[in-house]
Structure formats: C-alpha cells, structure tokens
Amino acid sequence: MTDLFGESGPRGADSYSAKDIEVLEGLEPVRRRPGMYVGGTDESALHHLAAEILDNGMDEAVAGYASFIAVSLEAGNYLSVHDNGRGIPVDPHPKFPKLSALEVILTTLHSGGKFSGKAYNTSGGLHGVGSSVVNALSEVMEVEVARDRMLYRQKYARGKATTKLVRAGSVNNRRGTTIRFKPDPQIFGNLQFSPQRLYKLCRSKAYLFRGVKIRWSCVPSLLRSKDDTPAEAELHFPGGLRDSLTDDIGDAARVVPEMWAGDAALPDLPDGKSAGRVEWACAWLETGDGFLNSYTNTVPTTQGGTHETGFRTALMKSMRAWGEQRNNKRAAQVTAEDILPPLAAKLSVFLRDPQFQGQTKEKLTSPEAARLVETALRDRFDHWLAADPAQADNLLAFVIDRAEERIRRKEAKDTPRKSATRRLRLPGKLTDCTRENAAETEIFLVEGDSAGGSAKQARNRETQAVLPLRGKILNVASASTEKLRQNQELKDLIEALGCGAGEQFDRMRLRYGRVIIMTDADVDGAHIASLLMTFFYRELPELIRHGHIYLAQPPLYRLTQGAKSVYAMDDRDRERKMKSAFKAGAKVDISRFKGLGEMPPAALKDTTMDPTKRTLLKVVSPPEDRAATATMVESLMGRRPELRFQFIQENAGSVTDVDV
C-alpha cells in the first residue's frame, strides 16, 4: 500500500525507532523544562522557589497548626524557612515502604497532603509539586523535621537524596519543619535572592493571614545601602488586609473617607461543608489609578480569576441597587468599568480544592468561586452603603460621573479624530491673546457681541482672550446627546479651549490657565452663568476639579459725586457705599448698567478685568459634597420641572430682597 510519501516512506524514517524515545524519570523533567513549573529561569522564577516553600508554612498556619514562620536569607544565596507546624511526616510511605513520606514528598511530583482534603481544608497547593520542584532546582537542600519530640534530618542535591533520613536526637520544646536550600547555579546562573523582594513577600503573607507572625532576618552584608529593608523584623498585622491597604495608599485623597473592609464565611457547598472564607479591603481614590490585588489561600493571583469576577459583580449590582433605592435612574447605566479603575482593593479568598491555570497559580479558575464571592460580598456591601446614606450617595454620584464620561467617550468615537498635522481651527468670534504660555493666560466668556466689543477693548491683548457667546447656551443637563453634539456655540467653546471633550479630552492641551465666565450682573446674566457652569460640570468636569473655572464679578451700579466714582455690586452694596463713600447730604448720581456692553471699556477693565483690582470667584466641586452637587444640578437644571418647583417652594422663604 502506498503511503502519502511514496512506497518507501519519508527519507530517514528507518533511523527513528524505540531507542529514540526518551523517558525522564523522577524530577529530571523539572530540570529539563523548569519553565513549565516555575515560569522560567529568571529572577521571578528564582523567587517563586521561595514562595513555594513559604506557602507550605502558611498552609500550616491557616490550618491552625502553626503560629509563626521564620524566613532567613543567609550568605551564599541560602534561604531558610522554618514553621512550628506539625512537621512533614517521616514514617514509611504505604506505597513506597522503603522510603519515608518526607523523601517521597521531596523527590516525587504530585505527592503531598493536599489532594484528599483530610490534612488541609484550604491550602495554597493543589498540584503537589511545590517542594519537589524546589528540591529539583536546588544545588543543596537540607531538611529538619521536629515531630513527636524527635528531630530528623536529611540532605538532598538537585532532586535526589544524598543522605538517609537520620534521627538527630530528642527535642521537647520544638516542632515543625525547617527547609534550607540554595538555588542551583546550573539553572539560574548568577542570580541572587533579593532581600527587598523576599521581605515584601513576607509582609504580604503576614497581611493575608492575621493570625501568623513571620520573623524575617537577613545577613546585613546582603542589604544595599539605599534599601530600607530591615535586617530583622517581626511581621504581624491584626488588621489584615485593612492594614495592608492603608499602608499601600497612604494619605491619598479618597472619594469617601471610610474604607470598606471585613471578612466573612463563604456560603456552604451543596454537600453542607464549608467552602472557605473571604476577606476584603476597598478604598475609592479621588485621583490616579486604582488596583485590585487578589489572593487565593495566600497565593497571589496576579492574573485574576473567578474570585475577582464575583467581586466585580457584587459591587456593580449593589451600586445599581442603591441608585434604584434612591430613585436615581442614571445608576442603571453603571458598569464594573465605572467602579473598578479608581478602586484600590485587596481581595483574599480561602477555598477548598482551588483550581488554578498552570503550576504558577497566577489565575484562579474554580467556577464556583464567582458565585460564592458574589453572594458573600453583595449583602455586606448593601449593608455598608445603607449604614451611611450620605457617604453612599457621594460614592454613587462619583460612579455615575464616570459612567456618563464613559458613554460620552463611546459616542465621541463617531466623530472622526482630527489629523495631528492639521492646523488648529479657532472660532471666528474668538479674539485670542498673543502669549503662548497657557498658565499665564485667560479667556473671558461673555454674552453677545456688544459685551464682547467692550471686553475686547478693555482686555490685555497679551494675556487675555475674549469669546462672545450668542445669548443663552444649550442646557446640557436636559438636552439630548444629539443636540449637544450639533450645538455650534458649544463646539466653538470647546475648540477655543483646545482641550477637547469626551475621549479626546486632554487637560494638558488647555490653551488658557483660567476660563472666566463674565456675564451681566442681573438675573439673565446669572442664568447664563448657570448654564455655562452646568456645561463644564457635565462635559468638562476636570476643568472644575483642577481649578480652571472662575466667575467674574462685574458691578451693577456706578455712583458718582463730583469727580469721585465708585462701583457697587448690588443693591445692598449700593446702599452701604452711599453712606460710607460720599459726604452726607450731597447729591450722588446713580447709574445702573443694563449690561456689560454699556460699560465703558475703561470701567470694565478697572472693575472686572484688571487682575490687580478685580474679584474672581473660583468654581469648585468638593469631593465630599459630590452627591449634593449632583443632586442640585439635576434638580435645578435637569429635565424634571417638578424638582425645580419643589426647590422654589422649599427656599422661597429665604429670599428677602428681590431686584426687579
């Protein structure tokens, strides 16, 4: 029969036979392909060896059998890890009666006490390869086991026992396991353990299990002069993840001051047995990027997994439910994408029989973890929100702001991005300043061409720009997105500022250090100022948060007596200055400005535009009042007129002086 290669088969086929099939025994596969077990032969893989041995001690602590772990970095790149747990069994193994259980564990892949669930309810190990892999990749490994008041010792080299298990004498006040090893230079070359990295590893483990004390020590000569790693330390953190997160974020500004932190049992499994427990700590940051550090049975899951999925889902559903409870329909658009980026969080779960993706355990794949974590955290986050409604409202407002910004960015993708080589287009009505340093310049937004004409004559041409706007701009709080996108006045305003909006927003491209709203000192002027502030609050909130938006304070009256003239801001100021600035009984001419356009340019400059004489009000939105601000904007500027009517009814009594 003719095969695909012809009757004689492929050239060289006769040279391939059973003798070419290589069988790797014992731990030889680990030494041939270390990347399959520890991720490679780089510095990260080197420190993975330390984590594997430390995890064994942590498993004893989490199971309630050990109270402390000692980690010592010694000269010659030796690392020693000791715990006061039960000690690795040393009696003969039933399947290999000529070998002790200790030697089986250290020389055989997939052996250990973590498969059946009898020795450990939860553990960082699943595959049973940790200690044996470390042994295989070590030039030397020395093991001491204190068990049943007897001390046992055995030595290994590159995965094989070099001595028999020997009794070293009786011990009355000692128990547990000590493993001292040196990574093999044949595998890792000249790489050395980093004291700083090992110390951080020990700190993270101590944070993850508040019941354990980890004693760290390092030969002083191994510490770098610029490194703040101590030579000795006892690490114990009763606050657990709360202490860890507080240490990480320091005094960073938070959206809400209180941290959400705690621990709880996971729901029982269908067989009635405990599934484990979960601990968490969360803080929302006002600025900068957040992070989510997750762990399973004290093992860092740097690539996330199903426990993080349950965590995200619990937060999202709780925030939406709180918004629905507060009758805030905008909360329905909130997703995990709006909640997580500014969130600094730590999540630790302890599970029975966890499943990981790969031996390095960087991603949890246990399918039931998502449901268990979501169920445990959802109810507790609901209670945390309800315990402080004002704080919860503030957090909700912050998250909704992010959701609306996300939606704006998505809609902005429909608008083609300008070419980077295209010359900047400025609105024809803009009268720009000549100085290019944005921090030293300002733009005045004025109502109409008449006021714009006066402002242009009164300005400092070098540092002050003027953009006239046509009457009252669009109310962005009640207008549709389509109307906003088509509004020419707002397009001109955004192009004049230069920083873009939505996905194209970049505060570093803002062309002016101050954006000054300058409107008439009457009711119509106040309305226009309110519309502009609403626009900045909804569409360019970063300009408010970073202090770029101001309100000019033009006078309403000019008071003249002879050659003396003074200006008054309102009726009350007029009466006060009538008494204080002029001679009693003499006639005072009172001129009321109908608008900025009727003010002589010299008067406008002297009262409103000259930086040495004027008064500006900075528009702010304090983080602690975020919910109150959002409610006020929605009530006064939103689509529901009944909210404005309610506000008028509730506040009409506080109006004592109305200028007609």
Image: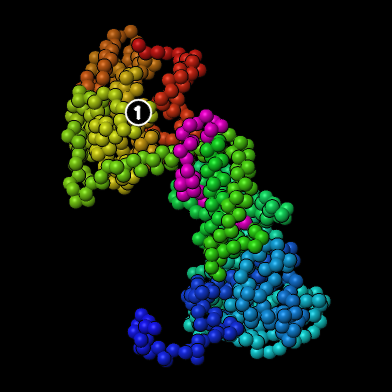
From this view, report whether residue 587 is shown above or below residue 267.
above
Q: 270 or 264, which is in the foreground?
A: 270
Q: Which residue is mark 1?
A: 479
The spot of residue 617 in percent (x, y) is 37, 31
Residue interval drawn in magenta: 323-349
* Viewport quadrant of the C terminus: top left
From this view, report whether residue 59 is shown above or below residue 136.
above
**Is residue 264 left or right of 91 when viewed as pictured?**
left
Q: 593 or 641, which is in the foreground?
A: 641
From this view, report whether residue 434 is shown above or below residue 273.
above
**Is residue 262 left or right of 227 when viewed as pictured?**
right
Residue 328 visible from this viewpoint? yes
Residue at 60 percent of width and 66 percent of height: 202
**Is residue 116 left or right of 653 when viewed as pictured?**
right
Residue at 24 percent of width and 26 percent of height: 470
Give neighbour class at mark 1: few <14, some 14-19, many 20+ (Cα, 10 Å): few
* Viewport quadrant of the N terminus: bottom left
Residue 346 counted in the magenta span: yes
The spot of residue 328 in percent (x, y) is 50, 31
Residue at 38 percent of width and 38 percent of height: 541
Residue at 22 percent of width and 22 percent of height: 597
The spot of residue 164 in percent (x, y) is 71, 89
Q: 446 or 162, which is in the foreground?
A: 162
**Is residue 278 left or right of 610 when viewed as pictured?**
right
Which structural element holds mark 1?
Answer: loop
Q: 221 or 573, which is in the foreground?
A: 221
Residue 226 counted in the magenta span: no
Image quadrant where residue 207 sits: bottom right
